[in-house]
Image (cartoon, grey):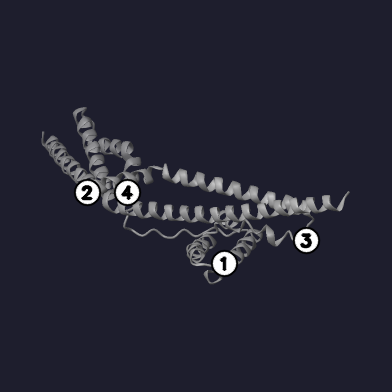
């Protein structure tokens, strides 16, 4: 083979290697940006959910309680008309509404702090893998190592995310962020081996970006996010949907309490009839 041909082949290989490195770097940045986007999206949804529950859930709970009592008294009155004994009436009511009572009684007020769930202990090999990933990422994304202001800003967003993933044993997030370091492991390989390794890494990054986009789409098409958008759009148009919904529930509760009071009076009158 002529020397010129060897030089040409090497130049093509070098260009392809450079192209793969650049593609990996671009994909790695996409993974970082999409991971940050998901974290922000989840934070927005959780914040809205807490706000929604604080304003609305207590009204739904109260309405459920009143409507359950109405059903119980209607059944009592029906059984009284059928000349069922007092003891049997209460037994039937208890039997019919036991599940509904348990559901209402078990409901927690939204402002009651819930205990933070304890993460299950990982097997030793996974725990070590988690720790190794965390150390590697904490070193890679330390803001002090940023080359410019933009990169520093992204690193400052990623570090709390990395800390959260570590404490919650979120291996998937840490593994995604650890992709793109093939260049640290290919220096001793042949040209062909290097190309194969880089192509494999690029495929992994492509899969990761696809999964992250699917997750973003899943969150945005979810009921909570759609309700959040609906309420925010209405607010921009000058309508406070949360306040309107709360007032509507208050009216329903007031009406139901009036009906419940009438049913209770009918029940008491049936005793003296």
Among the two numbered marks 4 and 1 on one chain, the one whose residue lies closer to the N terminus: 4
Percent coordinates x, y for residue 231 in the rendering: 29, 46
The answer to whether the residue labelled 3 contacts the one labelled 2, judged by CB atoms less than 8 Å apart, is no
**Does the CB distance between marks 3 and 1 fall below 8 Å?**
no
Closer to the camera in the image, 18 or 3: 3
- Which residue has dot 3 on it? 188
Closer mark to the observer between disc 2 and disc 4: 2
Q: Quadrant of residue 175?
A: bottom right
Query: Distance of mark 3 from mark 2, alpha carbons?
Result: 66 Å
Q: Residue 173: where, in percent of width, then height?
A: 55, 55
Residue at 46% x, 43% y is 217
Q: CA distance from mark 1 to mark 2?
A: 44 Å
Disc on the earlier residue, 1 or 2: 1
Residue sitting at x 32%, y 36% = 96
Instruction: Tell whether 12 sits left or right of 175.
Output: right
Q: Residues within 10 Å of mark 2 (few under 14, many from 20)?
A: few
Nearer-N-terminus badge (3/1): 1
Q: How many marks?
A: 4
Gap between marks 4 and 1 measured at Cα: 45 Å
Report, in whole angstroms, how far the alpha carbon at label 3 lies from the one at label 4: 66 Å
């Amino acid at each position: 083979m002529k020397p010129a041909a060897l030089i040409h082949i090497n130049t093509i290989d070098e260009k392809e290697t450079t192209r793969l490195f650049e593609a990996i770097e671009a994909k790695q940045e996409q993974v970082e940006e999409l991971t940050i986007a998901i974290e922000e999206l989840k934070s927005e949804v959780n914040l809205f959910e807490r706000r929604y529950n604080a304003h609305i859930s207590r009204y739904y709970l109260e309405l459920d309680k009143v409507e359950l009592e109405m059903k119980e008294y209607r059944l009592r009155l029906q059984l009284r008309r059928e000349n069922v004994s007092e003891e049997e009436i209460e037994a039937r009511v208890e039997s019919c509404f036991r599940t509904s009572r348990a559901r209402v009684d078990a409901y927690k007020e939204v402002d009651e702090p819930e205990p933070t769930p304890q993460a299950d202990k990982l097997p030793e090999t996974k725990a070590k893998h988690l720790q190794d990933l965390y150390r590697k990422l904490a070193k890679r994304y330390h803001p002090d190592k940023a080359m410019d202001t933009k990169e520093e800003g992204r690193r400052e967003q990623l570090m709390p995310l990395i800390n959260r993933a570590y404490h919650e044993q979120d291996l998937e997030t840490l593994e995604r962020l650890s992709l793109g370091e093939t260049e640290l492991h290919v220096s001793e390989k042949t040209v062909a081996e290097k190309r194969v390794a880089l192509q494999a890494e690029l495929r992994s990054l492509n899969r990761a970006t696809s999964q992250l986009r699917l997750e973003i789409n899943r969150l945005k098409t979810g009921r909570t996010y759609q309700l959040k958008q609906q309420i925010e759009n209405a607010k921009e148009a000058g309508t406070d949907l949360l306040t309107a919904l709360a007032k509507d529930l208050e009216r329903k509760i007031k009406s139901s309490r009036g009906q419940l009071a009438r049913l209770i009076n009918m029940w008491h009158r049936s005793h003296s009839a």
